[in-house]
Image (cartoon, grey):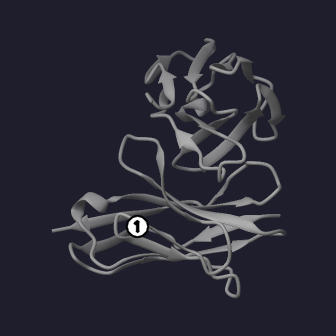
């Protein structure tokens, strides 16, 4: 079945450090890929998305590129801030397969001063 | 837009009691999702509706759980009877099918069953 695998957390970084959170997927069709972020005590929010191979999603300094050849969608940010501390979820939806999201397990990011 | 609205935000109840969680999706959205989040199991999809019709309820844990969507602007998730292992944060999300499938989440209901 379809699945998303994320690196385990927590990831702890100093402010202004470079961030990478790995995400790989398995899908039977052609998925759209998403990163959602959950701040403490809140629901998930869409951070960025990519709908086809080689697309780059970007938002708030975060980027992720849809790599079909490696079935990956790694999240990156050049310089993290304390306010980026949250849980990050990678997710996919199959195109034409309904609108059910398949989520990864989430990766907690802690950014310290 | 007010976003997805959930009530109550917090619920504490005793084992055996009935619990009803409520959700108002974003106006114009035609898909609605109920999720449960726990430390042990992460984020789980319980059930989702398209145009008020349940499409996939395979994630509903057992018969104690039921969900309804009587109209496009309201849904309920009911647990009867509740058990301590039902303690979790329950999220409702909505989306507009054919619009990139982006889901908008509510703030969640934190349920504690003692």
Indicate the secondary structure of the residue bearing disc 1. Answer: loop
Q: State left or right for residue A2 relative to residue B73.
A: right
Q: Is residue A73 visible?
A: yes
Name the foreground residue: A57 vs B33.
A57
**Residue at (32, 79) in percent of width and height:** A78
Give the percent coordinates (x, y) of residue A2: 78, 64
Q: For the N terminus of chain A, which image quadrant?
A: bottom right
Q: Residues within 10 Å of mark 1 (few under 14, many from 20)?
A: few
Q: For the C terminus of chain A, which image quadrant?
A: bottom left
Q: State left or right for residue B38 relative to residue A72.
A: left
Q: Is residue B81 above or below residue A25?
A: above
Give the percent coordinates (x, y) of residue B76: 65, 19
Give the percent coordinates (x, y) of residue B37: 55, 43
Q: Within the image, what quadrant is residue B65 found in?
A: top right
Q: Within the image, what quadrant is residue A109 found in?
A: bottom left
Q: Is residue B84 above or below residue A55?
A: above
**Residue at (43, 24) in percent of width and height:** B9
Q: Is residue B62 above or below residue B20?
A: below
Give the percent coordinates (x, y) of residue B72: 68, 21
Q: Within the image, what quadrant is residue B15 found in?
A: top right
**Residue at (43, 57) in percent of width and height:** A87
Q: State left or right for residue A43 relative to residue B93.
A: left
Residue at the limit of the structure toward the bottom, as seen here: A69
Residue assigned mark 1: A10
Name the foreground residue: A42 vs B64.
A42
């Amino acid at each position: 079945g379809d699945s998303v695998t994320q690196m385990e957390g927590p990831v702890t970084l100093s402010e202004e450090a470079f961030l990478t959170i790995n995400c790989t997927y398995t899908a039977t069709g052609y998925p759209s890929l998403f990163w959602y972020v959950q701040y403490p005590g809140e629901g998930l929010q869409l951070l960025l998305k990519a709908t086809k191979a080689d697309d780059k999603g970007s938002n708030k300094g975060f980027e992720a590129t849809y790599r079909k050849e490696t079935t990956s969608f790694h999240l990156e940010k050049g310089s993290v801030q304390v306010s980026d501390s949250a849980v990050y979820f990678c997710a996919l939806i199959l195109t034409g397969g309904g609108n059910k999201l398949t989520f990864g397990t989430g990766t907690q990011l802690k950014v310290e001063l | 837009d007010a976003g997805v609205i959930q009530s109550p935000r917090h619920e504490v109840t005793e084992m055996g009691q009935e619990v009803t969680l409520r959700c108002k999706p974003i106006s114009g959205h035609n898909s609605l999702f109920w999720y449960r989040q726990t430390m042990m199991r992460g984020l789980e999809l319980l059930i989702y509706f398209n145009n008020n019709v349940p499409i996939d309820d395979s994630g509903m844990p057992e018969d104690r759980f039921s969900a309804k969507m009587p109209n496009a602007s309201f849904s309920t998730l009911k647990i009867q009877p509740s058990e301590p292992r039902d303690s979790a944060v329950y999220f409702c999300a909505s989306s507009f099918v054919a619009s990139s499938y982006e889901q908008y989440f509510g703030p969640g209901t934190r349920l504690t069953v003692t």
